[in-house]
Image (tube, rainbow, N blue to C red):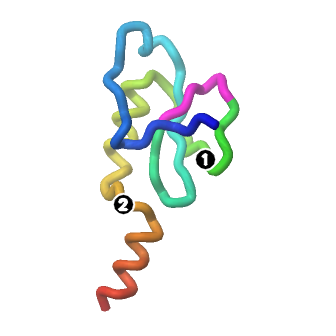
Amino acid sequence: MTTPKTREHQEEVHEGEEEEQYVVVINGEAQYSIWPADRDLPPGWAGEGTRGAKSDCLARIGEVWTDPRPRSLREHLARHDQ
């Protein structure tokens, strides 16, 4: 099964990719990625609402994904930080 590229695995935008359409996706751990718009989303991922060129989608992820730690880890640390 293919999974979206997370922040650690994002690649540079190459020539020709700006013409392709992508969607920003998010998983249950609040991790973001991009996925080709013409393909069905993989299990465990949902559309975030942004669609466009690869660079636009990556820019959106840069705006909204400020903490790359999985949600479960952030919640665990928050519970034990009190």
Query: Which image quarter holds the N terminus?
Result: top right
Q: Earlier in the sequence, mark 1 or mark 2?
A: 1
Residue 80: x and y in percent read 35, 87
Report the side of 31 relative to 45 (left or right). left
Residue 13: x and y in percent read 35, 20
Residue drawn at 46 percent across, 46 percent down: 32
Query: Which image quarter holds the C terminus?
Result: bottom left
Along the line of sight, which residue is nearer the eye, 8 or 39? 8
Q: CA distance from mark 1 to mark 2?
A: 17 Å
Residue type marked 2: Arg
Residue 64: x and y in percent read 37, 49
Q: Dot 2, how many residues are within 10 Å of its Cα: few (below 14), some (14-19), or many (20+)?
A: few
* Secondary element type, mark 1: strand
Residue type marked 1: Trp
User: Magenta span covers which residues?
Assistant: 34-39
Residue drawn at 48 percent across, 57 percent down: 30
Report the side of 24 relative to 65 (left or right). right
The label on residue 69 is 2
The label on residue 45 is 1
Q: Residue pushed farthest front?
A: 1
Report the side of 66 relative to 18 (left or right). left
User: Where on the picture, by quarter, is residue 55?
Assistant: top left
Q: Is residue 81 above or below residue 42?
A: below
Q: Does the segment drawn in magenta span residue 62?
A: no
Q: Dot 1, how many residues are within 10 Å of its Cα: few (below 14), some (14-19), or many (20+)?
A: many
* Secondary element type, mark 2: loop
